[in-house]
Amino acid sequence: MDDRCEGCELKTGRRKFLEDAARMAFGIAGISYGTGFRLPGLSTVRYPIPATDGATIDKQNQVILVRNQGKAFAFALSCPHQNTALKWREEDHRFQCPKHKSQYDPVGTFLKGRATRNMDRLPIRIDGKDLVVDVDHMYASDKDPKGWEAAAVTL
């Protein structure tokens, strides 16, 4: 190894770059497992207003979008019990956690299982023909019941 490069700016810059890249990789991994981390600058996501009742899961943005009986809701993808990605069961018209089988109705209300609270809602609003979801904020029904209840739009 050439001792002349020991303190040079290029070597220090490369080391810092690799450390920063590793931190970023761990942060992205946290997003994919629903731990609540968000990429900087990603604050809202737009979706076309669904034409019919049902659920759409956006894994990339960790959002579940639901249209149910004239209202729209946006939920965090992860189960509030242990952050496992929730699944929509069309045949039962409900959400279920594959890990511990907690169940939720289409508006996110806890029905049964190991979870102790409702699904986490995200702020949602209408903008023209789109629904805009704020992915940087979340309402937990046990910590902010008024915010959780208000996180819906009438279509």
Image (spheres, rainbow, N blue to C red):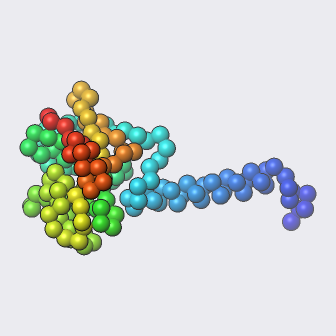
Q: How many marks?
A: 0
Q: Position of residue 60 (x, y in %)?
A: 37, 51
Q: In this view, does 101 lie to the left or right of 12?
A: left
Query: Image point 66% across, 57% down: which residue?
Result: 18
Q: In this view, does 69 lie to the left or right of 49?
A: left
Would you say residue 90 is visible in this rendering?
no
Q: Which residue lies furthest to the right in this view?
A: 4
Query: Image point 16% across, 68% down: which residue?
Result: 112
Of residues 2 and 69, the one nearer the viewer is 69
Would you say residue 153 is visible in this rendering?
yes
Q: Where is residue 122 in the image (x, y as percent from the top left)?
A: 30, 46
Quarter of the image with the N terminus is bottom right
Q: Position of residue 49 (x, y in %)?
A: 20, 36
Quarter of the image with the C terminus is top left
Q: Which residue lies furthest to the top in this view?
A: 128
Residue 43 in the image: above or below residue 60? above
Q: Quadrant of residue 77?
A: bottom left
Q: Is residue 83 left or right of residue 8?
A: left
Query: Image point 78% across, 55% down: which residue?
Result: 11
Query: Image point 8% across, 43% down: which residue?
Result: 69
Residue 47 in the image: above or below residue 26? above
Q: Where is residue 124 in the image (x, y as percent from the top left)?
A: 27, 39
